[in-house]
Every structure is written in structure tokens, then in C-alpha cells.
Image: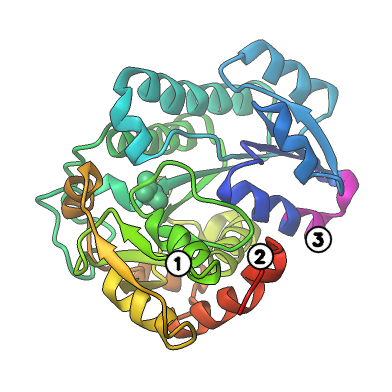
Amino acid sequence: MEKILVIGAGGQLGTELTKALVNTYGSNAVIATDFQESARSKFDYCSFKVLNIMDKEAAASLIKEEQITQVYHLAAILSATGEKNPIQSWDMNMGGLLTVLELAREYNISKIFWPSSIAVFGPDSPKINTAQDAFKNPTTVYGISKLAGEHWCEYYFNKYGVDVRSLRYPGLIGYKSMAGGGTTDYAVDIFHKAVKEEAYTCFLQSDTYLPMMYMEDAVNATLQLMAAPASSIKIRSSYNLSGMSFSPQEIFECIKLQYPNFTINYKPDFRQQIADTWPKSIDDACAQKDWGWKAQFDISKMTSEILTKLPLYFNYTTK
Ligand code: SER
């Protein structure tokens, strides 16, 4: 039987991925963990434990006691928060991953999932349909840690045979939890403002195109990658993954079709400089070829689904 440990389960991705793992493997097969006790309330449907991945001994005893067979290591400090405290972010992002990789080797864990990001690309990478192997010169501590992490994943696979798999997620957009400290967070925040019938002040310029993905696609891509036979995983650093690309003005106009009184203004801050170094769109031909990936959501399908479900989920009073 599989026993799956999710690290950082209380975050934006973990909140939805943990649920999907329980739906796939059953509630007895999944242990959600987060460094914050407050995340416990999200997991009334499976077991929950407090775990700070910087505490290697605690992680090791949990893995041993629970006979963990798979780890989804999602805990990280994202791009915008990372710039405020670079060394702490590096320690957390790299330290956490290396702990997980080491424990995978020591305890023969059969599969590891670790998210990478479009942040591995930098100002000198091609911007349009950025390819899997495009030149990378990340300029954020988050991007640097993701690129280094990709190399470590490859190293552990080549040297120790650790079956570690990874995706370079675009900005993830879901309605079940808030985004946590990234440059693409505006694309989540804007929906909350719209359904609460408040004006939105965007921290990126109106024409800043970035690669984005609806959470359902991100969860499905992850499950699909992890279910694929090891022989079809040809890339052991991390796979480019593409959903959609849009600018703040485009998502605003899409929302406005259902909320005609919605207004936006633009006050770019330090996150603009980060966004300017990232691709505008991504080529995910390798993911399509190796394990059959295809995104299902475009901007309009995503927008209408979020605008329908978000107000009910958060109990907002609506029009
Ligand atoms: N969504 C992330 C961020 O903005 C990118 O991986 O930091």
C-alpha cells in the first residue's frame, strides 16, 4: 500500500493536491503536514501532523514510523517573499529539498515530487514559447534555488536512482486558497476583489504577460506525471508545463464580462522587475510527448468556473 507524505500541505497547491491524492489513494494513504498548526483545520478528511522540513530528525522519524513510500515536498518561499530575505529563503528552499532527497535515499522512498517554476528562466531566456532547454539565468533567489534544486534532483536520480519527478509550474490560480508570496499572486487576488465588488489595485503593469495555469490542470498534471511509468520520465530536472498566458488587463476584461462594474488600477511595485525577467509563454512539448500532457483550461473557461465557485466557497455575499 502507498503511504504518501505531503510537506507544505497547507499552501496554495497543497490544499488542492492533498485532496486529489486522498481521492486517488484513499484517506488512510495520505498524511498532510505543514509547519503551521493552523493548517490542521483544512484536513478534516485525512491525517495531519505539524512538520517543519528544516527539522531533519523529525522528518526522518515520521518517514520511518509511517513507512512512507512517496513524498510530495511542496514547502517553499516564493519569489516575492524570497527577495525580502534571500539567505533565509535559500536555506529553506535548498535545505528542505536536500533533506527530502537524502531521506528518500536512506529510506528507499519509491517516488518524490518536487515543484520547480518558470522562475528558473531569466532576463536572457527567450520570452515567447520558452523551450525546455532554453538558456537560464534566474535573477531571484527563488529562481536560483529552483534551478539549483533541479540539478540536485537530476543528481540524486543519476547517482542514487531516486525516482524524483518535477514540474516547472507557471503561476497557479485556484479559488480554494490564497496565493502565498509570489509574483503571479495578482491573478488570484483579482478574483476575490471582483466577487466582493471592490476595486482592484494591481501590482503589475497592465500589459505584463505571464504563463499561468488553473489549479485543476496543475493537480492533474502532477498526478499524471507521478502515475507515469518511470521509463517514460525522460527529464529528471523538471518539465516545462504550459496552461495559458495572459496580462492583468486581459484577465480584468474577462472578469468584467460577468462583473461589468469591476474596476482596476495599476501600481507596479518591486514584483514588476521580477515579472519582467520571466517568460511570457512556455513550450511544453516534452511533457506532451513523454507522458501525454495537455491542459484543459483556457482563460475564459477558468474565469467562469472561478467566478461561479469562489463566492460560494468563501461565503462572500454576491450580486
Ligand atoms: N507563482 C510563483 C511565484 O510567483 C512562480 O513559480 O513566485
- Say whether marks 3 and 1 touch (CB < 8 Å): no
Question: Which residue in the rendered view is the most extreme toward the right?
Answer: 28
Residue at 46% x, 65% y is: 198
Please give the residue where the numbered disc 3 appears in the rendered image. 23
Instruction: Name the kind of residue labelled 2 in the image.
Output: Tyr
- Magenta stretch: includes residue 318: no
Crowd tier of the residue under label 3, counting other residues whose Cα lies within 10 Å: few below 14, some 14–19, many 20 or above: few
User: Which circle's residue, 3 or 1, is located before the other in the chain?
Assistant: 3
User: Which circle's residue, 3 or 2, is located before the other in the chain?
Assistant: 3
Instruction: Name the kind of residue labelled 3 in the image.
Output: Asn
User: Which circle's residue, 2 or 1, is located before the other in the chain?
Assistant: 1
- Residue 156: x and y, percent? 47, 31
Report the mark closest to the observer, 3 or 1. Answer: 1
Residue at 84% x, 28% y is: 66
Our reading of the magenta stretch's main secondary structure is helix
**SS state under label 1:** strand
Q: Which residues are magenta?
A: 21-28
Please give the residue where the numbered disc 2 appears in the rendered image. 316
